[in-house]
Image: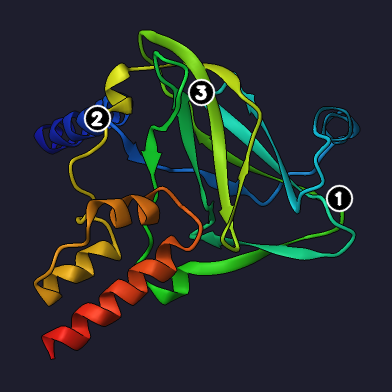
Amino acid sequence: MKFKIGILLLLLCHFLNAQQSEMSVNQNHYNSDFIANAELSKQFETKLKPKKVFKLIALSNPDEKISVYIQNNTSDTISISHQNHKIHILQEAMDEKGIWKPIEYWESSDCGNSFDEIKIEPNGIIETKSTKYNGDFKTKIRFKLSENNKVYYSNAIEGNINLSKLIMLADFSFTWPLEIMKNVGKKTPMELQKKVVFLEPNGMEEFNQFLENSLRKKN
């Protein structure tokens, strides 16, 4: 029994180290118990001026997490989609040249029951918590939200990462739904892979069209 526990701990440590050193899938989780206070609401009023559907504020926490607050900036109750209580966001970091690059990617679920929506009242605020990485490279971190084929960015906060997290993976075809192409016998082009896993507008629509065309040619 002790041997089995030791193996599990070893595997867990390996997984956590890999998360810190390599580009990894985003693991944010929506906090359904969150209630915004007056101070946070005031930050949205004073710091963020542009008129957009969603506003984002990222704040680092002592508990090794980063809170991403998302406000409905309209006069109507609207919905934001989630997958297993994960909002469609990922982290980006500034590289050594000051260029924003993704350090996380998104992987869709293969289960239809994983998808749902969260209703947000006018000026309402929700919270999701995401991973805080560590490393030797001091940089700035921001969050990218994708919703209804539009992209929204948070403020930038101080952070530390390993430079290896900025290295682009050579292939994302192992992620769902890109792995569907294995059954077609054709690989998804890298640029299209990036559009899907980095939550680019219309990325999934372009992939679905690519898949449909590939199936048509196969049959």
- Under circle 2, the secondary element is helix
> Residue 64, labelled with which disc?
3
Residue 18 is left or right of residue 94, and the answer is left
Q: Residue 103, located in which quarter of the rendered image? A: top left
Residue located beneath label 1 in the image? 123
Residue drawn 36% across and 13% down? 135
Coordinates of residue 159 in the picture (x, y in percent): 50, 16
| Viewport quadrant of the C terminus | bottom left
Q: Nearer the viewer, residue 151 or 179?
A: 151
Coordinates of residue 29 in the picture (x, y in percent): 53, 46
Say what amino acid the circle numbered 2 marks.
Answer: Ala
- Under circle 3, the secondary element is loop
49 shown above or below 112: above
Q: Contact, CB < 8 Å: mark 2 with mark 3? A: no
147 shown above or below 90: below
Say what amino acid the circle numbered 1 marks.
Answer: Asn
Of the image marks 1 and 2, the number of the one nearer the N terminus: 2
Residue drawn 26% across and 56% down? 175
| Viewport quadrant of the N terminus | top left
Say what amino acid the circle numbered 3 marks.
Answer: Glu
Residue located beneath label 2 in the image? 18
Coordinates of residue 18 in the picture (x, y in percent): 24, 30
Residue 145 is left or right of residue 177, and the answer is right
Of the image marks 1 and 3, the number of the one nearer the N terminus: 3
Cα–Cα gap, marks 1 and 2:
38 Å
> Residue 135, labelled with which disc?
none
Q: Residue 164, located in which quarter of the rendered image? A: top left
- Under circle 1, the secondary element is loop
Residue 10 is left or right of residue 193, and the answer is left
Q: Mark 1: few, some, or many residues within 10 Å (few <14, many ≥20)?
A: some
- For discs 2 and 3, the disc positioned in front in the rendered view: 2
